Amino acid sequence: MKPVKTCNWQRLHLALLSTIFAAAVSVSAAAQATAEPAVGGKVLSFAVLGDAEPKPEPYFPNVAAAVADVNKLSGPLQLKFVVGVGDIAHKGTLVQYKNVTPVLQQLTLPFYPIMGNEEHGSTVDRFLQYANLWNQGKISIDAASYVLEFDTVALVLASPDHGRDFADSGIDWMQQQISQLHPKPVLLVVHGAQAGVYPENAEKGIQHPGFADVIAQPNLAAVISGDLHMDMDRVQHSKQLGKVHYLHIPALERTKIPDETKHTAMYRVFHVYSDGLVQVDTYQTGTDQPLARHAYQFRLSANQ
């Protein structure tokens, strides 16, 4: 595992626009996909937690609620691990890292986090120190970016190099990992998707023009990201642009988009089936059934 390693915005913006106009999937088409039954047996299930970074007070009640729910559902859903999309500790402060640690240590499953722009308020070393404290020996995380490989799919977890963006070395690392995994389908976990994917805040996200080459990799199936703190009920949180599916993970402690008037703590669960189907469910904390209105399905390969 190697650490990741920003940026002609126009090139990336044009590439994204051409992708959208060439092959964007409508909301209705995505909704129809959720009705498709799974044919193959389930081969992998995992939960994904979104941003926390509470302010002004460093308390994590909704993270704690999500942890309790995931622990309870881990058996019935056969969850194997939990992913974090970054921005756990606001500005990377020590008090936030310390206060969230006993909360995340309650997870019974391995926790695989990446850094967000907030963690870059401090250092990579501090992030790695606490990522391992959170896991209490269940796993060892020795780099800010790493790969989880399974029989039918791989997860490439890429921390930004600065803020929410990448340096050339980070772009090269992602391309190399995805290319080496070919033809195995890849789910790419980044803190923020490339700018323009979510029109609710189109300017915020990865600006590096080289990211267009990352998402062009033939075996990249989906990009999983957080960062925007979007209200799942008032945005289009899951979509397909070209051949790539984009899945937003909502923030646990605070909602920002489209405004801050309503916050509902949610997290998402991914189920991968042997026939290539991926079912994405969304849970509100404190409930044991997914929210049907936020269900989404996609195929790991367009040929499946």
Image (cartoon, rainbow, N blue to C red):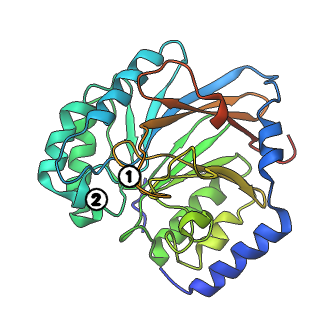
- Residue bearing mark 2: 119
156 left or right of 20? left
Q: Quadrant of residue 18?
A: bottom right
Q: Residues within 10 Å of mark 2 (few under 14, many from 20)?
A: many
Q: Mark 1 and 2 residues: CB-CB less than 8 Å, in contact?
A: yes
The first of marks 1 and 2 along the sequence is: 1
130 left or right of 29? left
Q: Which mark is residue 299?
A: none
Q: Secondary structure at mark 2?
A: helix
| Residue 220 in sight from this viewpoint | no
Q: Does residue 236 lie above or below 271 as drawn?
A: below
Q: Secondary structure at mark 1?
A: loop
Q: Where is the C terminus found, in terms of image quarters?
A: top right
Q: Quadrant of residue 256?
A: bottom left
Q: Does residue 9 lie above or below 177 as drawn?
A: below
- Residue bearing mark 1: 86
